[in-house]
């Protein structure tokens, strides 16, 4: 059985002290495990990721109930820089890079000024090792990069912080399928070579279930189904509502009336 490095236990997140966005969410990430949180817009995925990373405060939100534990230490409602210092590093959905800085400057930005030059170079080479394309673009302004290159740079910059748990918000958003496949392959390499856990938030169930060892599906701020990759890929409701498959046809869950959903989630 995989040892959990991150344990989220029945958390509730409230915005502006009145709006409950996440209700009773429980999940865990084990050592060297890739875990996905799936769901449509507004399901509570990004809010859950922000709760873990400590970035709720920027949206006037806080964890009102439950707990988040990382390697045996409670971290719920801790400040973002303290959580980053513990080894949890977020790759955000928006504002991934500094557009006016070069690729090299973006990679250097997260590194402590107190770090020795040799250590900085060693960490930088790690980013280039996983994303060789970035080495070719060292002097290019990040604002001139393609969407896929920006995502590479955002993950590379996160690696500069020496994460023990990497949080990635919407890996595939706006990217071509061939780019997504390449990023998935590189995330696997990061997990395998660095031995870290990865928690991935995704709207695309197809993309997430290509890489995740385990996944949670959220709707309306709650986890409605969880399981390993094979269980979810073979689950009838997941096929119909999230993978767009029904009666041998490709379908979109957006085209299916909500009242047709049965109570089979935990069946």
Image (spheres, grey):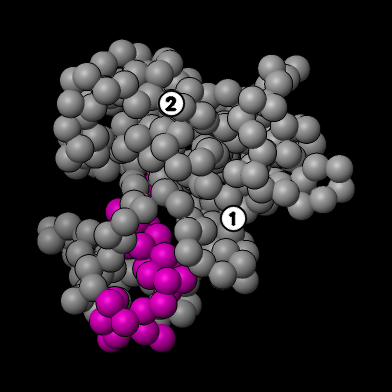
Q: Quick one: SS at disc 1?
A: helix
Quadrant (top left/top right/bottom left/bottom right) for the N terminus: top right
Question: Which residues are drawn in magenta?
Answer: 136-163
Which residue is the site of mark 2?
221
x 28%, y 86%: residue: 139
Q: Is residue 75 left or right of residue 262?
A: left
Q: Nearer the viewer, residue 141 or 185?
A: 141
Residue drawn at x 71%, y 21% is: 262
Q: Position of residue 227 (x, y in %)?
A: 67, 29
Question: What residue would you read off at disc 1?
Answer: 188
- Residue at the farthest left position: 113
Residue 87 position (above or below residue 185): above
Residue 193 in percent (x, y) is at 55, 56
Residue 263 sits in quarter: top right
Q: Residue at x 77, y 46 (%)?
A: 245
Residue 145 located within the stretch drawn in magenta: yes
Q: Position of residue 236 (x, y in %)?
A: 78, 33
Q: Residue 156 vs residue 98: left or right? A: right
Quick check: can you spot residue 266?
Answer: no
Is residue 85 in sight in this rendering? yes
Q: Mark 2 or 1 closer to N-term?
A: 1
Q: Quadrant of residue 135?
A: bottom left
What residue is at 41 percent from the left and 65 percent from the top? 151
Front of the two marks 2 and 1: 2
> Around disc 1, counting alpha carbons within 10 Å, would you say few (fewer than 14), some (14 to 19), or many (20 or more)?
some
Within 10 Å of disc 2 (Cα), the crowding (few <14, some 14-19, many 20+) is many
**Secondary element type, mark 2:** loop
Residue 139 part of the magenta-drawn span: yes
């Amino acid at each position: 059985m995989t040892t959990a490095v991150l344990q989220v236990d029945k958390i509730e997140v409230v915005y502006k002290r009145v709006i409950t966005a996440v209700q009773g969410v429980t999940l865990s990430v084990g050592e060297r495990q890739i875990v996905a949180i799936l769901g449509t817009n507004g399901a509570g995925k990004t809010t859950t990721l922000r709760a873990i990373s400590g970035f709720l405060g920027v949206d006037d939100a806080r964890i009102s109930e439950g707990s988040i534990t990382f390697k045996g230490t409670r971290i719920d409602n801790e400040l973002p820089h303290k959580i980053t210092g513990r080894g949890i590093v977020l790759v955000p959905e928006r504002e991934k890079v500094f557009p006016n800085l070069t690729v090299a400057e973006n990679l250097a930005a997260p590194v402590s000024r107190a770090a020795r030059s040799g250590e900085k170079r060693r960490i930088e080479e790690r980013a280039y090792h996983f994303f060789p394309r970035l080495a070719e673009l060292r002097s290019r302004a990040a604002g001139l990069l393609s969407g896929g290159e920006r995502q590479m740079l955002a993950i590379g910059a996160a690696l500069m912080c020496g994460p023990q748990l990497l949080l990635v918000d919407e890996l595939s958003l706006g990217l071509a399928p061939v780019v997504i496949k390449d990023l998935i392959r590189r995330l696997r390499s990061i997990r395998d070579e660095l031995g870290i856990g990865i928690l991935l938030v995704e709207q695309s169930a197809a993309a997430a279930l290509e890489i995740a060892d385990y996944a949670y599906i959220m709707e309306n701020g709650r986890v409605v189904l969880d399981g390993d990759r094979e269980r979810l890929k073979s689950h009838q409701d997941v096929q119909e509502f999230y993978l767009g498959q029904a009666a041998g046809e490709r379908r979109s869950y957006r085209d299916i009336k909500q009242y047709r959903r049965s109570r089979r989630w935990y069946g």
